[in-house]
Amino acid sequence: MKRFLVALVSVLIGAGVVAGVAVFAHATSGEPPLLVAEAGGTVDTPEGPMNSASLELYIYPNNSDAVPGPMEGVNALYASQGWPFYWPSTTLQVPANSLVTVTIYQYDSGGRVFNPYWAKVHGTVDGTMTVNGKTVSEWDPTKIAHTFTVHQYPDAGQPNLFVSVPLPDLGANEVGNANPYVDNPKVVTFTFKTGEPGKYVWNCEFPCGDQYQEFGGPMQQRGWMSGTLQVV
Ligand SMILES: [Cu+2]
């Protein structure tokens, strides 16, 4: 009986450690809550009718009383860093086999993107986006704030999905520091097609962080300038 109790206790301790590690890992991963695209109606396309959905995202230059920024897990530790971030979440879900329209309200300043490839629009319907209502396929590489760039895992056996749009900057003197920051953000819209379900990652390819080549800080911390895109 004693041996049984010792075994039972050690199993319980083991389970407790596993549960503790799981809770700790979740707390430190800082994955923001899931943001599900809003379903739209059926749209006629050259390939026939398709479902549609839409997502709205905001990019703020820093957090504020009105917009606290990502606070999940370890992200709360970075709340005072003044990092730029996507809002309200970087954990995105969109429907499969659909036309997904994303609108991004961009409130941050920027500068030159190292690689002009990221100043061009890739992977959207017609290869275009709109900026404040005007249709374009690229932007001045010296006036980029961030990018929204969807990749897939290198070894993923799922449909290819690559979408990247440059997000135009505001002039440094145009950027406010309190919500709503400024009255005239750059408003970017673009539409892409999803295929069968898959799990993708997305990030910003404009080095808006710190440390090595400005690719540290918010660039490498989930919840700020990178996240996941689930196609379901
Ligand atoms: Cu960025």
Image (cartoon, rainbow, N blue to C red):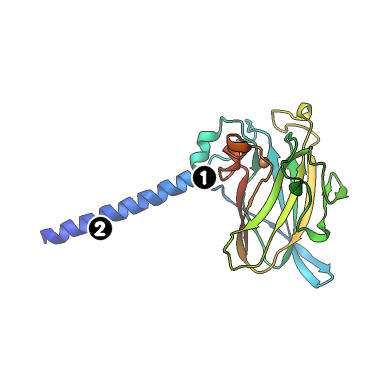
- Residue at numbered disc 2: 11
Which residue sits at x=72%, y=49%? 56
Nearest to the observer: residue 161 or residue 63 = 161
How many C-alpha atoms fall within 10 Å of the one at disc 2: few (<14), some, or many (≥20)?
few
User: Is label 2 within 8 A of ligand 1 (CB to nearest ligand atom)?
Assistant: no
| Amino acid type shown at disc 2 | Val
Ligand 1 appears in which quadrant?
top right
Q: Quadrant of the N terminus?
A: bottom left
- Residue 225 percent location from the top left of the image: 63, 43
Q: How many marks?
A: 2
Left or right for 140, reference 81: right
**From the viewer's perspective, is 144 left or right of 230?**
right
Q: Residue furthest left?
A: 2
Residue 99 percent across, percent down from the top left: 75, 62
- Residue 217 occupies which quadrant of the picture? top right
Is disc 1 placed on a helix, strand or loop?
A: loop
Q: Is 144 situated above or below 98? A: above
Give residue 23's position: percent from left, percent from top.
41, 49
Q: Is residue 227 visible?
A: yes
Q: What's the CA distance linking mark 2 and mark 1?
A: 29 Å
Q: Quadrant of the C terminus?
A: bottom right
At x 54% / y 48%, what residue is drawn? Answer: 31
| Nearer to the camera, 148 or 70 | 148
The label number, if any, that marks residue 30 in the structure image: 1
Can residue 69 be seen here? The reply is no
